[in-house]
Amino acid sequence: MKYAFFPGCSLESTARSFDLSTRAVCRALGIVLEEIPDWTCCGSTPAHATNDSLAVALPVLNLQKAQAAGLPVMVACASCYARLRTANHRVCSEPEDRRSTERITGLPYDGGVEVRHVLDVLVNHLGLDAIRAKVRRPLAGLRVACYYGCLLTRPPEIVAFDNAEHPTCMDELVAAAGAEAVEWPFKTECCGASLSMTHSGVVSRLAHKLLSMAQKAGADCLVVACPLCQVNLDLRQADAAKAHGAFRPTPVLYITQLLGLALGLPLGNLGLDALTVRAEAMFAKRDAGAVGIAGGKS
Amino acid sequence: MKRGDLPGKGEHDMSDPIPWSGGGLLEEVRKRSGTEVGACFQCHKCSTGCPIGPDMDYLPSQIMRLVHLGAEKEVLDSHAIWLCASCEACTARCPMAIDIAGVMDALRIMAIDRRIVLPDSRGKQFHRSFLGSVRRHGRVYEMGMMTAYKLRTFDLFSDVDKVPQMLAQGKLSLLPNRSGDMKQLRETFRRAEEED
């Protein structure tokens, strides 16, 4: 099982631990990742909000490189994933978009490179049985709220690997890791995404709403699969509590960090030290002996 | 920011309606977004599910109606089109399959093209700073992008308290990570600007 890996800009900076843990989990599960050579930014929201041709051309530059390597693409960042899938959709369904993209990038592209999210690869390509078989340290007793956010499931005709209103793939992974996925109503509500820089008050309001609901549902932590969700819910927790009322600080882990713990991978490979709301206390509170990471070493 | 009254509702009922000013705006938005914005029948499902609705001056369904009415100034001057977080909840749920988030993109691009003086330029300046960073380095260089954004908006101090922690956690780096393939990227930017 081999994929061309598109990390995206966040995975080199704010989401470094998503990069580390994705690579570590894939290695442990036998998924070979070959980073797209000289990949460039997908353009994200700033491209699609200001220049329509650029919003298709920037992702296509990377898809052309993957096509040259002859591999399907795996993406970790939810926003990059949505931009790459949207570019493929446009190139395939609009002949004029294909012509203009080929003109702009200077190279042919037929929209034929398959683009999958790491969740899709884990659940639908590798399969839950293969993951369960490799779980060394089941996270028994841990209650987890799975937060999908916007772009993993929307718009459904473009991303399409899980239900748009009630996705379950992360819940299934959490269960495979031996933890309990709690039912809660805000799985696909938006966290405010890139408004984080421009209108941080809006993001604080949304983060407060999401985190207090997860807490009401009895979650010890949240898991996410998007760099913006993680930053908005983790780094802005103190701001949210100050502006909208106190709640218990809740760790927000990448799903790959949680899986890595269950697979028994070395902690240094999972980037848990980059969490603003640290996870150690949460694990210490549980039966520390069962998981054996309370001391922070392995 | 005051929420705009729905055209034809409340005190605006009969005395001060927004007059229909021809189908020009509707046609332009339809062409740019590639979606049938005219099909909106004001069910307000988009507004009900919009996470940013409470912060907007016009709700998404109101923006759709203003586009029908040709109320170009109200739409292109609005905060709403720049506050939209592109979460696509509206697009996924619209019973008429209108790509409402795509309409918001089209309106932002129109506001830039027409050089509208925005009431709040933070969204536009963020996008500009972000793409400037990509054009220079091939990838986003967060420190450079944040500095450019702060200088453009005179918002020098917000979130500065988080920088030392983010540096310590390795979430920000002092130097850019450059892509090795800058020539093709810069050509792509240049041609995309010519075409758009």
Image (cartoon, coloured by chain):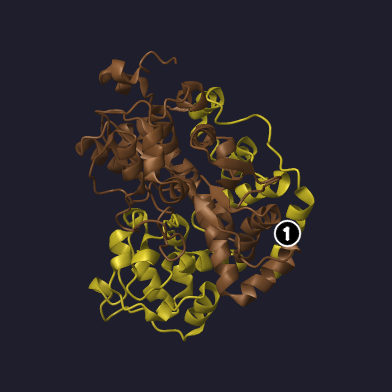
Chain colours: A brown, B yellow
In the rendered image of this protein, does residue A32 appear above or below residue A293? Answer: below
Residue A131 image point, x, y percent: 40, 38
Q: Tag 1's secondary structure?
A: helix
Pinpoint residue A115: horizontal percent, then vertical percent: 54, 56
Q: How many marks?
A: 1
Tag 1: Cα neighbours inside 10 Å, few (<14), some, or many (≥20)?
Answer: many
Residue at 35% of width from left, 41% of height from top? A173
In the picture of the structure, the residue carrying the numbered disc 1 is B188
Quick check: B136 above or below A114?
above
Q: Pick whichever, B63 or A188, lies toward us.
A: A188
Left or right side of A64 for A251? left
The image quadrant that residue B110 belongs to is bottom right
What chain is tagged by disc 1?
Answer: B
- Residue in front for this viewpoint, B141 or A258: A258
Picture coordinates of residue A69 (x, y %)? 69, 52
Q: Is residue A23 left or right of residue A70?
A: left
Quadrant of the image containing the C terminus of chain A: top left
Q: Amino acid at mark 1?
A: Thr
Question: Residue B156, how many percent across, how many down?
Answer: 55, 36
Image position of A32 with respect to A104: above or below: above
**In the image: residue A233, left or right of residue A36:** left
In this rendering, does residue A253 appear at all? no
Q: Residue furthest right?
A: B183
In the image shown, does A209 or B68 lie closer to the viewer?
A209
